[in-house]
Amino acid sequence: MEGSLFGRRVLLIISGGIAAYKSLELVRLLQKEGAIVHGLLTQGGQKFITPLSVSALTGAPVATDLFSSDDDERLSHINLSRQNDLIVVAPATANLLAKMAHGLADNLASAVLLASNVPVLVAPAMNSVMWAHPATEANIATLRARGVLQVGPARGFLACGEEGEGRMVEPLEILDAVRGFFQNAAPSDQTMTGALSGLRALVTSGPTYEPLDPVRFLGNHSSGKQGHAIAAALAAQGADVTLVSGPTCLEDPKHVHTIHVQTARQMLEACQKAGAVDVVVCAAAVADWRPVLSADTKMKKGLLPPSVMLTVNPDILETLATQQMNRARLVVGFAAETDHVVDYAKAKLLKKGCDWILANQVGQELGFGKDDNEIIFLKRLAHDEIAVEPWPRLSKQDVAERLALQVAQYFAQVKRDAA
């Protein structure tokens, strides 16, 4: 997954033109380079390709309507215009370019572009006479003066049967333009190894085992693969990482200080002894309950099974997120659910007092003990609003690297805001 665009967030606006079919290939190329792509399809674009074809490639819902009845805030024109590193318009029709130049906002695409505070790259596509018309030339000049980037158009045979300049350039050329944009971005916007240098991170991983007797315990199926991968990914970005791990069969990650524990209370104690840190990631699957009493010797099987009284374990995520002294600047939790994943994760995010939640559905060949994960990334915004972003199915290593990139971008923004 990692490539020259790894972790870069690109909104692809596909407007109405025969070249729209090429944008599906552009999605594939961007994702191959590691970009996170979201799609916006205009009404005209839907005459040539379907929202389903775009969402099947991006792995995320496709925005289509400014006045949709869908209450998904991810698809609002404000969120779409702000939560990306670059907006690519391909194809960019004469009509949409005119709307951009004159500040119109009568559909979702033009509203997103007007509300955007991120760079925009357009790939024009239209009839050659339309491209050469003084109105289009004036619109392009206006957009260039505002800093809008442009690639193409190319000369060749057009869908109308004529030949001339106006053909959208090939997806590979658009990909090169996107690469060039990020390569020339200011160093403070670049994500690189060492982006978390000087920061301290605390990660919890694996299950906890709550003993019933010296032989038996209450536990779960967590393998620790995701938490260990996160610790390694944060260390690769330069962070000083402490990993508090429950019982697993995994080797300790390199360049990470690992503390081994068994129970939830031991895990909380180790976390509190770690001292002040900048970021906490609670990826461990901590047992919710423990036996009130644990036998000193093995309980023998009798005619009736023994009764076991349980009590609630300490909530490590909530404790670390709500502590008054030495709270980390960024606290991240996980929510492993079997159903109603987003609803439960939203409730957990607000109840625990953390900043981000990575929700995942366990079962169905995902989650505990598996190599892949399918994450829904939730961020707490101002006024307790929550941004919800589904990630495609990824290896746990890729999930870890994507999260580490999000953490690096968060602290880079904190640094810029403080400057």
Image (cartoon, rainbow, N blue to C red):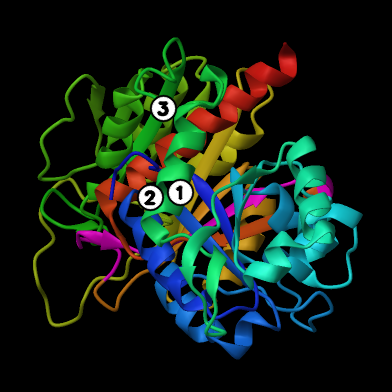
| Left or right, residue 112 beside residue 271 | right
Q: Marks 3 and 1: which is nearer the front?
A: 3
The crowd level at tag 2 (other Cα within 10 Å; few <14, some 14-19, many 20+) is: many
* Vertical placement of residue 282 versus 169, above or below: above
Where is residue 87? Give x, y as percent. 62, 52
183 or 313, nearer to the observer: 183
Q: Which residue is the site of mark 2?
A: 286
Which part of the image, by quadrant, shows the C terminus? top right
Q: Earlier in the sequence, mark 1 or mark 2?
A: 2
Which residue is depicted at the point 51% across and 74% down? 19
Q: Amino acid at mark 3?
A: Leu
* Vertical placement of residue 411 versus 286, above or below: above
Cα distance between the residues tagged 3 and 2? 15 Å
Span colored in magenta: 366-383
Q: Amino acid at mark 1?
A: Asn
Where is residue 39? Give x, y as percent. 57, 67
Q: Disc 1, disc 2: CB below 8 Å?
A: yes
The crowd level at tag 1 (other Cα within 10 Å; few <14, some 14-19, many 20+) is: some
Q: Which residue is the site of mark 1?
A: 313
Cα distance between the residues tagged 1 and 2? 8 Å
Where is residue 40? Give x, y as percent. 63, 69
Which residue is depicted at the point 31% across and 24% down? 235
Q: Amino acid at mark 2?
A: Val
Q: Which residue is the site of mark 3?
A: 202
Q: Disc 3, disc 1: CB below 8 Å?
A: no
Q: Secondary structure at mark 2?
A: loop
Answer whether residue 163 is magenta in the image: no
Which residue is depicted at the point 64% across and 28% down? 323
Cα distance between the residues tagged 3 and 1? 20 Å
* Vertical placement of residue 360 versus 69, above or below: above
